[in-house]
Image (spheres, rainbow, N blue to C red):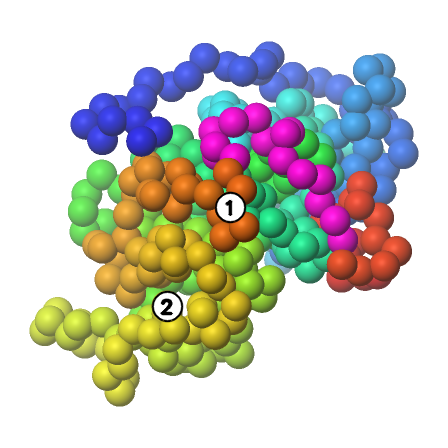
Amino acid sequence: MLLPPDKMAPLPPLLGPPPQYGRSVASFRDRQMIGKGTYGEVSRAVDKETGETVALKKMSLTLPGEANQKEGLAITALRELKVLQKLRHKNVVALKEVVTEEGRHRIPREIYLVLEYCESDLSGVVRTCSLLGLHIRSYMYQILAGLAYIQRHGLLHRDLKTANVLVTKDHVVKIADWGLCRWEPERERARLTNPVVTLWYRAPELLLGTARYGKAIDMWSTGAIFVELLTGKPFVEGRDELDQLAKVFDICGTPHYDGQYSGPRFVKRTPRLAEELRRRGVRDEKAIALAEQLLDVDPKKRPSADAAADDDYFWSPDEAGNFHAPNEDPASLPRLVSFRAGVDMSDLHEWNVKRR
């Protein structure tokens, strides 16, 4: 296991210098957008002083007096900044610096997080590349290593999906986009925000409307990512919450109604995930067994990230008989090969791949 279950890891020493503050975004050149979403824009840029390629994540400031707007940074931006200042792990994207862009009267109008740059995200990789079993094992193990780190410190990511898992050219995985994260509540029955997590990666208990949840929601999202890596397609593609829930129950079975649940009733279904994965072309029985654990409709039965990383799947040869210990240097993995013509392998971010 990554850590004995009865131990709590101390916060590790910083892997590099702490984030710097005070410079302007004008210190960077050759800015090119690589992502855009609800919570900000991300660009690739080059530091004029060092020549290092970085990612700039723009977060707009709302100034006093602007109509229909609350002053300051959005709560998601503040959350991401606060969390990234604390987290230091090789499988979590690193915050290097915070810079600003001045508006009128030299008042900062935009704030940028300067993050380490990764050439791809898993969404772009799945859409364009043929993944070997070796790649999938390594990527999944690294996701679980990053999750185990945050789970030991009581943190929920709450928006895990392939687009939020970055990959470097040396196959190092980095969990990114921390705007929806929060610390797990100390009180067992504390209520949290719902909805969270992008629909296709959302755990069934969230779809059923619960506001009391924990790390199991991130394990479900990890299971959905796992199926996407294995099959090249999203696990379940619901049109809305009800359709998503019906499709999940059709494959994973319905939960047991124990008298505490008062939501809508569904026709009882038995789990057929293994059958579905085989139908989609998955031949690795150990991979199927791990997916069944991660995608259990009962959150109490899903393993922790530590336990999942110790699964037999990671320590056995793939279906072709090849073996690469998942804790070995990912740089030794075979290079990715695209099944699409004309793909720029130096930039496999979802946003750019969709535009091509």
Residue 59 vs residue 44, the one in the foreground = 44
Q: Is residue 355 left or right of residue 269?
A: right
In the rendering, at what x and y percent does residue 193 appear? Answer: 37, 56
Q: Residue at 22% of width from left, 39% of height from top?
A: 186
Tell me, for residue 59, which label it has, or none. Answer: none
Q: Was residue 337 drawn as part of the magenta stretch in this picture?
A: yes
Range of magenta residues: 324-338
Secondary structure that dominates the magenta span? loop
Residue 89 vs residue 185, the one in the foreground = 89
Q: CA distance from mark 2 to mark 1?
A: 21 Å
- Residue hosting label 1: 321
Q: Secondary structure at mark 1?
A: loop
Q: Is residue 204 above or below residue 188?
A: below
Q: Residue at 30% of width from left, 62% of height from top?
A: 296
**Residue 112: quadrant of the picture:** top right
Label 2 is placed on what type of residue? Ala
**Residue 191: quadrant of the picture:** bottom left
In the rendering, at what x and y percent does residue 300 appear? Answer: 21, 54
Q: Is residue 326 left or right of residue 7?
A: right
In the rendering, at what x and y percent does residue 125 appear? Answer: 67, 51
